[in-house]
Image (cartoon, rainbow, N blue to C red):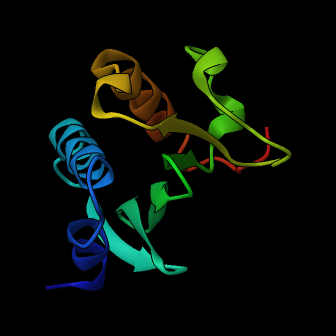
Amino acid sequence: MKPAEAYIYNQQEPFKSILMHVQILIEHTFPEAHLEYKWKIPCYYIGTRPICYLNKSKDYIDVGFWHANHITKHADCLVSEKRKKIKSLRYKQLDDIDDSIFISILREVEAFKNSSFMK
């Protein structure tokens, strides 16, 4: 098992289910995306460009987007928490995930993957 997959598989519930659901959404939206293990967390890339990372924090899953400054749709759903470049979606329960919002943000981030992180 690859390290990124092990990271997800070894999480306790509900975090394991959240991570697996997010994986399905990302891989369904972008079949060409690949999962890497960088900075001790799973990160999705399209080619050599990062799309998002998945991180289990204290009591939530943090799905971070480097190109978040370019996001205009659903920007109110993103958390910056003192970060200048990265914003994220946070989930404590599987039911917290709104698939349509998640996919909309993914598509917007992907559209700017070749742009600078800074807007």
Where's residue 50, x and y in %? 49, 60
- Quadrant housing residue 100: top left
Q: Residue at x 21, y 84 (%)?
A: 2
| Residue beneath the point at 31% across and 74% down | 7
Count how many numbered circles sit on residues in the image: 0
Q: Quadrant of residue 98?
A: top left
| Residue 72 vs residue 82, the one in the foreground | 82
Q: Quadrant of residue 6?
A: bottom left
Q: Is residue 58 above or below residue 112?
A: below
- Image location (x, y in percent) of residue 49: 48, 61
Q: Nearer the viewer, residue 115 or 35?
A: 35
Question: The C terminus lies in which quarter of the figure?
Answer: top right
Q: Is residue 112 left or right of residue 12?
A: right
Q: Position of residue 18 (x, y in %)?
A: 29, 44
- Left or right: residue 103 versus residue 70 is left
- For this rendering, which residue is in front, 117 or 28? 28
Residue 7 to residue 74: above or below: below
Figure check: 92 above or below 43:
above
Residue in view at x 64 percent, y 37 percent: 68
Q: Can you say which quadrant of the picture contains the N terminus? A: bottom left
Give percent across and percent down for residue 8.
27, 66
Q: Is residue 53 left or right of residue 72?
A: left
